[in-house]
């Protein structure tokens, strides 16, 4: 892991509009889970958004979106069972090429989101996909993220979750107050999580 951290370099850029809150039409300002302010405090956080693609119309509808501060992300990660964490880590280590992507696109956030980082499928060929970005205040961090994952890849990741993890994620979602009911239900049903 130290070697991986040593390699990791970060470039920052303005947040691309694709990572803006759909309802606010601007960057997320608070953590969806705990309401912590993110921009002025220059907090470290992630944004995950899922889309349903309609290539024949040239549009993509948003399925869900949220911002999660590093503290809530760590709590969510800790709710995963050790077997689930190991399975997910092994899956991504085996299939993802983050350093190659980072080398090729290190200065252009839009390029990271043109194809699935696992399958290589182009975004306009996908029925559903998710994007995940890492942020510090009002900047996107360009390193191993942002990433785009196809719907098929997310299904594979969900299959790696142990029954214990699925139960823990349900319990974690029950502790969150202020989360929109439809998003809470989506998390419980589909076990959406930031990698």
Image (spheres, rainbow, N blue to C red):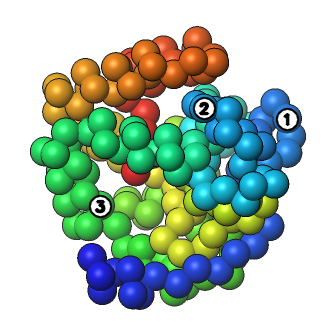
Task: Give the mark nearer the N terminus: 2 vs 1.
Answer: 1
Residue at image coords 17%, 53%: 86
Q: Is residue 124 above or below residue 186?
A: below
Q: What element carries label 3?
A: helix
The residue to which callout 3 is attached is: 92
Q: In this view, does 108 lie above or below 138?
A: below
Q: In the rendering, which numbered label is found on residue 34?
A: 2
In the shown orientation, is residue 165 left or right of residue 107?
left
Judge the density around disc 1: few (<14), some (14-19), many (≥20) Cα neighbours within 10 Å: few
Residue at image coords 31%, 42%: 78
Judge the density around disc 3: few (<14), some (14-19), many (≥20) Cα neighbours within 10 Å: some
Report whether residue 34 is seen: yes
Task: Give the mark nearer the N terminus: 3 vs 1.
Answer: 1
The residue to which callout 1 is attached is: 24
**Residue 50: percent from left, percent from top:** 57, 38
Q: In the rendering, which numbered label is found on residue 55?
A: none
């Amino acid at each position: 892991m130290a070697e991986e951290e040593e390699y990791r370099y970060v470039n920052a850029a303005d947040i691309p509009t694709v990572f803006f809150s759909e309802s606010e039409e601007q960057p997320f300002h608070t953590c969806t889970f705990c309401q912590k302010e993110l921009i002025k405090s220059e907090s470290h956080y992630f944004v995950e958004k899922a889309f349903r693609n309609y290539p024949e119309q040239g549009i993509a509808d948003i399925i869900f979106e949220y911002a999660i501060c590093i503290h809530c992300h760590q709590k969510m990660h800790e709710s995963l069972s050790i077997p689930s964490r190991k399975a997910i880590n092994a899956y991504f280590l085996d299939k993802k090429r983050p350093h190659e992507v980072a080398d090729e696109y290190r200065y252009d956030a839009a390029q990271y989101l043109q194809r699935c980082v696992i399958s290589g499928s182009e975004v306009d060929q996908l029925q559903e996909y998710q994007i995940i970005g890492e942020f510090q205040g009002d900047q996107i961090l360009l390193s191993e993220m942002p990433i785009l994952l196809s719907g098929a890849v997310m299904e594979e990741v969900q299959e790696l979750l142990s029954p214990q993890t699925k139960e823990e994620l349900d319990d974690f979602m029950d502790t969150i107050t202020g989360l929109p009911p439809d998003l809470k239900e989506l998390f419980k049903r589909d076990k959406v999580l930031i990698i």
